[in-house]
Amino acid sequence: MTSSPRIAARDNDDVQRFRAMRAAMPALSEGLSVEDLTAQSMPDASPSKWHLAHTSWFFEAMILAADPDYVPVDGRLQQLFNSYYESLGRRVERGERGLMTRPSLDDVMAYRAEIDRRMEARLEAGLGSDMDRYLFVLGLHHDQQHQELFLMDLLHLMSRSPLDPAAFPVEPRPGGPMQSARGGATRFEGGLVDIGHDGRAFGFDNEGPRHRVWLEPFLLDHDLVTNGQWMAFMADGGYRRPEYWLADGWATVKAEGWTAPLYWREDDGVWTVLGLTGRAPVNPDAPVRHISAYEAEAFAAWSGRRLPTEAEWESAAASAPDVFSNLFNEVWQHTSSAYAPYPGFRPTEGTASEYNGKFMANQRVLRGGSLATPPGHTRVTYRNFFYPQQRWAFMGLRLAADAPAARRPRIEDVETARFRAELIAGLSRPQKAVSPKWFYDAAGSDLFEDITRLPEYYPTRQEAALLKTMAPRLTAGFGDNAVLVEFGSGASEKTRILLDAAPTLSTYLPIDISPDALNAAAGRISQAYPDIEVVPVVGDFLSLPPLPELGRGRRIGFFPGSTIGNLEPQQAIAFLANARDRLGPGALFILGVDLVKTADLLIAAYDDAQGVTAAFNMNLLRRANRELGADFDLTGFRHRAIWNAERSRMEMHLEATRDQTVRIGDRSFGFVSGETIHTESSGKFTRDSVSSMATAAGWTVQAFEVSDEPSVAIALLSN
């Protein structure tokens, strides 16, 4: 019996995901010697060869061996590469993994190749049960964990050599580039908040169940603690003053002789640090790495601050991710929380029950992600954990503090809290600014739809006409049971053009920050297209979580309206790269862009004669007054549209027409006459700039078509 097209398409997607994941660790091994890959530097670290083998053993033990007729590749390997699973029999003690000279590295790679072959055959046959699918996705995330461990352990191995060797010519940063510091902190009101994984996409069992926690008002720094700040702590005797240390931490300092973070060394009064590219002077502006929980607690005490609880960290990161720098891409961030089960925690059934739960004692929780964390592996609910004395992981800290209680306590939903935090952070900058995503409450969404029908506003009608022409060609490659994922879907009007031309489409997944607009649009689409499953997702596409496991075919991203032009260039590349990762291997991406043209035509489109765009811009202040209790006087501001030729973008601003002070809660912000709030940038592109942007994000431009004048374009990208 042949499988249905829907299942076959999904199986092919599984194979592509598996291949992409399994290629990562061998890629890290390239250029390293056999000796680099086989030595073990300490009991906590494993040889690279072991990581390569163990991640293969995991798929064999957890998935392949579930078949009662399964014959192992080599039964002896079951003991050699078992990590800590008591139910699967004997194993080599962790500290002795480096003594296993047999099997050789070549034999391990042959074992890995054979497991990959068997797994691909298993995936092509189809994953039958929900548990099979969970274990498969668990295996992918387990592989990602060991990709990070590979780099952690390798760096520790390099540190044991007096030669200070470089493992790589360029630091591998799968987590993404380091972001610039922003300064300051954001206040969060706390109250009764929900934390933990909701079960809708993949999460480790220790991340759930979702539950409620009471938080008092708190402050959380926008930035990580830097090397420069840490050197000030050291210069003030931080490692010599017991009053800053927990008792066990001070005992560890004395026993281990700590005087600086791991891998730091002072030569002739100059501090250097060993990284994956060798030893270099300590960069005072970079976030500090490789510090234990004991050190983090001591630094916080010295600073007059504290570490956040994990609930504070998660609530803040979920509420206002855009106000923070380096949440997920530099260091795992220490919290003050002990690693313990959430209320109602239940381990995964079967052998995987040993994955997390049995370690819930004597360890501390870290949140976020690091430079070595593979893309797609992080979540705001992710609970990493280490013993408080360990410091070879990529660990750092972000400081918190208690905040004075407000005169009238506020308990806000997540979107309101995020709006408050981002608006306050934006108004605190030298050039006041706020993200254009906050335009789109229900009133703002309606006003934008009115804008699209204005005679001056050409982008919508020109793109719709071009999309109608291209739709048959765009949808021809969707394949059976395709999933259309629209980022910032709004009213979903242009979506209908694709839905009408794509009979093989099974699912439409719109993502939008406005629940009202999203639910209304999703309802209309469901009614008009009853055979298509509509799965609306409320969220910010710039902080895109993993997409639901829908069990369908090829995924197609859709980002029309030149919304990509609202993003800064590096932000646009990061969004496209994240979307590429979320959509997966074989995905397509339909991208609408506006093209460079004369200034008078552009300004007219953003400052129409009827004043609809001005009302749209001013609605941001109305929303702040209504939802945040702000006191913007709308008569004291006016709409401005500016063509910035140097940066090839239209800009919208709200300009103060007089000196004034605005209050948002207990915060006040002064404006001088002529000062502006930068509310939106709308970049204009050329074919070359689109190609460069797509290539930088890992996409390939398959097609690029331009409309009649006034010209817009649609690009088809492939992964």
Image: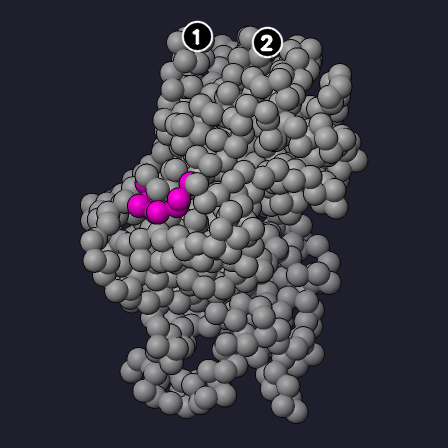
Res 62 → quadrant: top left
Do the CB atoms of the residues marked 1 and 2 lie less than 8 Å apart?
A: no
Classify mark 1: helix, strand or loop.
helix
Task: Find disc 1 in the rendering and name its residue.
Answer: 528
The correct choice, above or below, for 633 with respect to 171 in the image is above
Q: Residue 42's spot in the image, x, y percent?
A: 50, 72
Seen from the viewer's position, the closer of residues 289 and 120 is 289
Image coloring type: one colour
Q: Is residue 668 above or below residue 377?
A: below
Q: Secondary structure at mark 2?
A: helix
The image quarter containing residue 470 is top right
What amino acid type is highlighted by mark number 2? Ala
Q: Label 2: which residue? A: 501
**271, 79: nearer the viewer:** 271
Relative to 391, is 497 above or below? above
Q: Is residue 629 magenta?
A: yes
Q: Where, by quadrant of the figure, is residue 589 drawn? A: top right
Provide the residue span drawn in magenta.
Answer: 627-634
What's the residue at 42%, 40% (across, down)?
634
* Residue 314 drawn at (x, y percent): 35, 52
